[in-house]
Image (cartoon, rainbow, N blue to C red):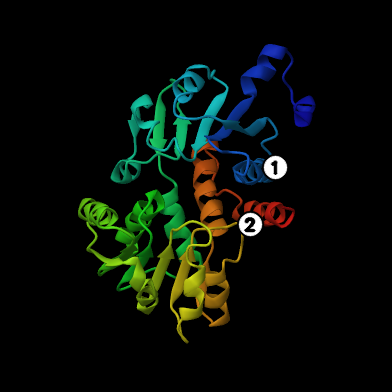
């Protein structure tokens, strides 16, 4: 990269040795903002010898991709459908990742060992803390997918009482209750038809795909608590816009994306704190340009 010319390395081999690489993998991956966020961090930290790319990799291609990495690689960010598929390919995973059986961060040690972690969970907690939400007596979760299990793990750290999950089937309800048992969270379940009742909780975490909660926007109460909507595009969602109009605190999917990326940058580079403000600004600019 351009900054390498100002370094003192005297041989091609020395220059190659200092190069560090990272990337995000998944399928589909073209939409990912991770390169924007990580590159902004590298620029702010003066890490001109670091690069961060994106690669379209599915479950079948993942073992071969990992096998082809050399010693210049520092780490990987993983998105769907790789968060569980990667686990058998790792040497160890953190307790946080094990708690939800999902890895979104892989860090390569100097000895070549592959360590998996989950930065979504502490990222959620940090994003809520930034908006002043540090402890609640109860909460509600809209949806029951992979992000919902991470939401329960985050709530296990800040929620003192029950969490009600609003879902579309008994199978999903049983799944959420199972995650609650595993994570030490009292999970109650309710049918999606009653989802507007979630808004009585002091904290609502919406984990559903784009458009799913639009019909609920008209049901936001006069004095809502806090809403964490994990979507970031399109933004604001109809629900988030209605929530803000009522004066409620709103945490966005971009807040989550930035905070989990902060955790990844710190783990991969060994530099802390990562530049949160610069990363968020880069993410906002990239979204604004789409």
* Res. 41 image quadrant: top right
Image position of 144 (left or right of 260): left
**Which residue is situated farthest in the bottom direction here?**
222
Q: Is residue 87 placed above or below 189 in the rendered structure?
A: above
Q: Secondary structure at mark 2?
A: helix
Q: Is any part of residue 132 visible from this angle?
A: no
- Residue drawn at 63 percent across, 39 percent down: 30
- Indicate the position of residue 265 as horizontal and vertical percent values: 55, 42
User: Alpha-carbon neighbours of circle 2 within 10 Å: few (<14), some, or many (≥20)?
Assistant: few
Q: Nearer the viewer, residue 184 or 198?
A: 198
Vertical comparison of 90 with 263: above or below: above
Q: Secondary structure at mark 1?
A: helix
In the displayed structure image, the side of residue 224 where residue 37 appears, left or right: right
Name the spot of residue 26 as percent of width and height, x first. Answer: 52, 35
> What residue would you read off at disc 2?
277
Q: Residues within 10 Å of mark 1 (few under 14, many from 20)?
A: some
Residue 245, quarter of the rendered image: bottom right
N-terminal label among 1 and 2: 1
Residue 222 is marked as none
Q: Quadrant of residue 174?
A: bottom left
* Frontmost residue, 8 versus 230: 230
Q: Residue at x 47, y 73 (%)?
A: 216
- Measured as percent of width and height from the top left, residue 220 is found at 47, 79
In the rendering, which numbered label is found on residue 43?
1
């Amino acid at each position: 990269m351009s900054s390498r010319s100002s370094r003192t390395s005297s041989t091609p081999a020395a220059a190659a040795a200092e190069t560090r690489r990272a990337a995000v993998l998944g399928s589909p991956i073209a939409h990912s903002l991770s390169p924007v966020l990580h590159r902004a961090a590298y620029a702010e930290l003066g890490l001109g010898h670091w690069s961060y790319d994106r690669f379209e990799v599915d479950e079948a291609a993942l073992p071969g991709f990992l096998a082809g990495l050399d010693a210049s690689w520092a780490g990987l960010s993983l998105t769907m459908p790789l968060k569980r598929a990667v686990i058998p390919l790792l040497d160890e995973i953190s307790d946080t990742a094990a708690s939800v059986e999902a890895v979104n961060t892989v860090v390569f040690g100097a000895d070549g060992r592959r360590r998996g972690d989950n930065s979504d969970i502490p990222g959620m907690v940090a994003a809520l803390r930034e908006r002043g939400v540090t402890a609640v007596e109860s909460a509600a979760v809209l949806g029951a997918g992979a992000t919902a299990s991470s939401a329960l793990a985050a709530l296990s750290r800040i929620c003192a009482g029950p969490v009600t999950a609003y879902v579309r089937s008994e199978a999903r309800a049983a799944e959420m209750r199972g995650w609650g048992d595993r994570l030490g969270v009292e999970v109650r379940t309710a049918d999606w038809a009653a989802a507007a009742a979630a808004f009585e909780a002091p904290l609502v975490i919406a984990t559903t795909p784009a458009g799913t909660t639009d019909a609920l926007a008209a049901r936001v109460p006069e004095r809502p608590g806090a809403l964490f909507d994990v979507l970031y595009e399109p933004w604001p969602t109809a629900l988030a816009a209605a929530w803000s109009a009522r004066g409620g605190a709103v945490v966005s999917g971009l807040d989550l994306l930035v905070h989990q990326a902060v955790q990844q940058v710190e783990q991969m580079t060994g530099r802390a704190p990562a530049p949160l403000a610069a990363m968020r600004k880069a993410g906002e600019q990239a979204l604004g340009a789409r």
